[in-house]
Image (cartoon, rainbow, N blue to C red):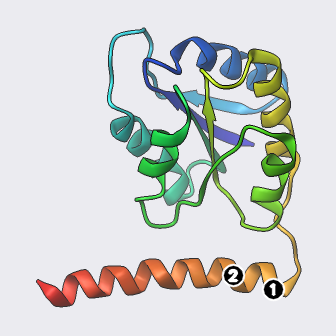
Amino acid sequence: MRIIVGADHAGFPLKGRVVDALRSWGHEVEDVGTHDGQPVDFPDVARSVCDPVRSGQADRGIMVCGTGIGAAMAANKLPGIRAALCHDVYSAHQCVEHDDANVFCLGAQIVGDQLALDLLKTYLGAQFSTEEHFRRRVRKLAQMEQDAAAELTSSE
């Protein structure tokens, strides 16, 4: 699987372990930074992680920040992104199986290294359900994005 990984300064210490683990599991990984502990804004990281996912250049994205909240908020502003903040194993597979999450957000200050790796393994091993009611809901999410974009365009 091709995976884009990014972090802000608060997520930087965990990001390195995430990248190393993903590569050891056989994934193709692109690390879009940050590459040091200097302050960086998570919306900028979200764009760097999400644009390749949106264009199909990556299968999934992973964002790490302090709590994961800012990462999820920023990522979900971009059309076509379904970012999930998960700090438990159940949510880590459910977000893909039911909601087709394509970006996974972690809080480095919330979860420890081992739990983070367990969550990622669970997320990456999950597949979107073929059940129609889950697929219908994801189509409705896409329609909500389109409707909001159309409303913005018509109000200009």
Q: Quadrant of residue 28?
A: top right
Residue positioned 75% across, 80% down in the render: 135
Q: Quadrant of residue 34?
A: top left
Residue positioned 88% across, 81% down in the render: 131
Secondary structure beneath dot 2 equals helix
Q: Where residue 132 sits: x, y (%)? A: 83, 86
Observer-nearest residue: 30 or 94?
94
Amino acid carrying label 2: it is Arg
Marks 2/1: CA–CA distance: 6 Å
Residue farthest to the left, as pictured: 156
Q: Residues within 10 Å of mark 2 (few under 14, many from 20)?
A: some
Mark 2 in CB contact with mark 1 (< 8 angstroms): yes
Say which residue label 1 marks. 133
Amino acid carrying label 1: it is His
Q: Residues within 10 Å of mark 1 (few under 14, many from 20)?
A: few
Residue positioned 60% across, 84% down in the render: 140
Q: Going by the image, does 42 lie left or right of 15?
A: left
Work out which quarter of the rendered image holds the C terminus and state it.
bottom left
Q: Where residue 30 sits: x, y (%)? A: 57, 30
Say which residue label 2 marks. 137
Residue positioned 67% across, 21% down in the render: 19
